[in-house]
Amino acid sequence: MTNERERIRRELVADPRVVEAVVDAVHERVPAYADLDDGRRGEVRAIAAWALERFLHLWAVDGDIGPADLRRFRGIAAARAADGRPLPAVLRAYRVAAAVLVDEIAARAAPSSAADAFALTRQLLTTLDTLCEVMAGSYTATSERLAGDRAQALRLLLDDLIAGRHASVGAVTDRAARLGVELPYPYCLLAVGPGRDDRPADPAELLAALTGPAAGTPLATAQGPRTVLLLPADAAGAAPAVLRERGLRGCAITGEGLDRIAVAHRLATCALTTAPEHAHRPGRILTDADAHVLALLAGHPATDAEHIGRLVLGPLARPAQRHLLEALTAYLDTGSATAAARGLRLHPQSLRYRLRRVRELSGRDPRDPWQRLTLDIARTVAGPPPGRDDGPGGGAFRVSSP
């Protein structure tokens, strides 16, 4: 160990900016890492911090990579094989990180430390050569094992999709193609939880019950007492009856793209966790609208408030249905059909007919406590309807056309 190398090692390890510089460089220069969400960026940061500390230690003491380090690198390679990230991209990320590290060391090294520079070059070449060998072997072995266990490979695919471990839609479709499957699209992400009897669902049995002839390969995985399924969008229509027969609760998300499967999963699972008891009705499951309202109430909406309002109201947000919106608003404000009819100068039977049309078009019954709450929130957070002026003394209703 030289005092100069140890000084540089301590400075670099203590400076959090160095790890961020490595992560930023990998993010910018390696396409497979170009779309890192917070979770995956944190994973890359943790690996970069560990690898930086280990490499600097080996350089400072003129050491070699030990068995424990090799085991961890093999584990990293196996994880990348499981989540479908290409091995060349993984190895390129390490080369990019090495280049950043050399620049950081050069900025701190004394001009006369040629021996340390040669040692650094030797350590980098040796380390990268070793990494290529051990990671390639582990990556290949894991890929072959997963290819031989199709069921496990499909479960891992869905696990990684809902965790957001893919850089792009292209990476998702490439991985699916390597497994010989086509992801359902448009899709329904269905999160299923136990009902009042706490009996968990059987993923394979649910998958069989909900799978029809539609295109795409349905996927299922278990997360503790919950089951998560990725199904063709048409399956959302059959889900309420299937879950009711089994005493289960569910939330079906159908309005997100392939690049937002992780968002759909977060919406669905959070909805199951936070929905009040009276939101669950036999023969009905929670939907995108319920999930977005619950996320809004929890303070972490997945989209803007006006979109949530339009999502809940559906066709009611169209200008042609303004009279139905007015009937709904009057009913929500007064609490009774009779009072609402009086305020709108309508016959009570006409008002009830309009409320029936509200139920038919929105799929929500304003007489149901939970559905009434979602409608009330929707008409509050959406924008004002075109042509309506809610000036001083105007109504509380807020809605806009799509």
Image (spheres, grey):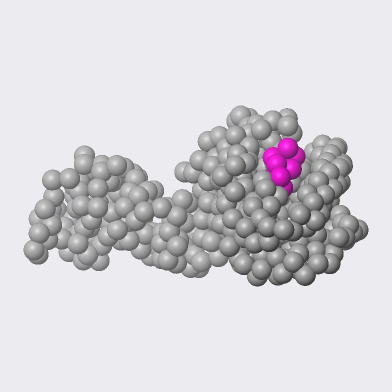
What's the residue at 70%, 65% (across, down)?
Answer: 8
Residue 376, relative to residue 146: is it above or below? below
Answer whether residue 87 is visible to the viewer in this image.
yes
What's the residue at 23%, 56% (across, down)?
Answer: 398
Answer whether residue 283 is visible to the viewer in this image.
no
Horizontal and vertical percent position of residue 399:
25, 51
60 and 394: which is toward the camera:
60
Seen in the image, is 308 located left or right of residue 29? left
Horizontal and vertical percent position of residue 71:
86, 56
Horizontal and vertical percent position of residue 313:
33, 50
Seen in the image, is 237 located left or right of residue 3? left
What span is colored magenta in the figure? 87-95
What's the residue at 87%, 56% (across, down)?
Answer: 65
Q: Dividing the image into 4 quarters, which one contains the N terminus?
A: bottom right
* Magenta span main SS: helix
User: Magenta stretch: residue 139 in it?
Assistant: no
What's the residue at 45%, 62% (across, down)?
Answer: 300
Q: Quadrant of residue 19?
A: bottom right
219 and 112: which is toward the camera:
112
7 and 303: which is toward the camera:
7
Seen in the image, is 115 located left or right of residue 86? right
Residue ranking furthest to the front: 112
Q: How many marks?
A: 0
User: Magenta stretch: residue 88 in it?
Assistant: yes
Q: Dividing the image into 4 quarters, which one contains the C terminus?
A: top left
